[in-house]
Amino acid sequence: MTEALAKLTQDDFEQVVFCDQPDAALRAIIAIHDTTLGPALGGVRMRPYRSEEEALEDVLRLARGMTYKAAISGVDLGGGKSVIIGDPATDKTEALLRAMGRQIQALDGRYIAGQDIGTDSDDMAVIARETPHVTCVAESAGGGGDPSFATAFGVVAGIRAVLKEVRGADSLRGRTIAIQGVGHVGYFVAKYCHQGGAELVVSDLSEAAAERARAEFGAEIVNADGIYEVECDVFSPCSVGAVVNDRTLPRLRCAGISGGANNVLAEDRHAAALAERGICYAPDYLVNSGGLIHCQAVLRGGGELQRERILERVGGIYDQTLAVFRKAGAEGITTAAAADRLAEERIRRARQHPL
């Protein structure tokens, strides 16, 4: 716990709230990293964490990542995240979600919730009964719905940028894309890549999700561990984070990486390790920022009516990713460091010239 708490000061967190409501079986943590650009937005993740220490470490990494995601994508939001300790398959109840909503409401708009791993738009509709500070609410409840389609659209824009960088052309036709996780975001990544003429290789812990990708997109299925060794043009991790690590990195047979998962790199040093192997890395918080762009539009009253305009803006991730590649090359730094500098520059300008 001491190491995780030290990160609060090291990474300048504004607020971290530990929530414990036994009558609703709620144990949760809400982390607000930075609100320079606007209220902190970040999903509500529910996982059966082994300990509060593990949950704290996860929420801190995710909240900081959301700050950088908002900054680099140009939205006027800050970075935050929340995690609920529990198994969403067995522990999620209306009482628990409404208790979470009351915890969010107590922050008076400093944190805006959205869906994440272990939660969905229907869960956000339950949370919305207790607080207006929530997005990704189910359309049936009057909200903007699941933003996975927008997140995936940005991931594919990143894939195309990687192809442009490593193959000289951004066409998906005839390229092999290996997708790890074909649930919400990964499903749409597979759909868009299939529409573009790509060959797909997929893995998913859910046999049903993998079989759906095979049936709809002609995808080849490999086991969860085998996805790292697929010879492909682009590897697209769309499930959990930290999948590029000391164990997996030597096994990768891709030319580039662009995925929907957060915190793809287990440690910062893995960005340099990828570069040394000649693997082009599109920073995850840039290419998966389409959902955040969608959420801002919904918060401002857009939603489905602006779907085409939202996707047009999300498509700008292609040019932003190429700009990151150029900056990395010009300054002799990794693409991850280049993206960080661009995000930090925007936050620094906002602090120096507040409205």
Image: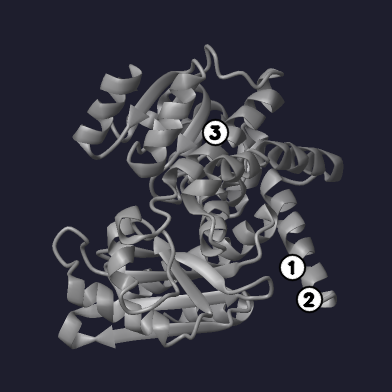
Amino acid type shown at disc 3? Val
Q: Secondary structure at mark 3?
A: helix
Cβ atoms under marks 1 and 2 closer than 8 Å: yes
Label 3 environment density (alpha carbons within 10 Å; few <14, some 14–19, many ≥20): many
Residue at 52% across, 70% down: 80
Q: Left or right: where does residue 205 sit relative to residue 6?
A: left
The C terminus: image quadrant: bottom right
Describe the element under mark 1 as helix, strand or loop.
helix
| Res 156 → quadrant | top right
User: Where 172 falls versus 297 (above or below)?
Assistant: above
User: What residue would you read off at disc 3?
Assistant: 156
Quarter containing the N terminus: bottom left
Q: Nearer the viewer, residue 110 or 46?
A: 110
The structure residue drawn at horizontal position 39% and vertical position 53%, both measured from the top left corner, is 145
| Residue under pointer 2 | 351
In the rendered structure, which amino acid carries the disc numbered 1? Ile
Label 2 SS: helix
- Quadrant of residue 91 within the rendered picture: bottom left
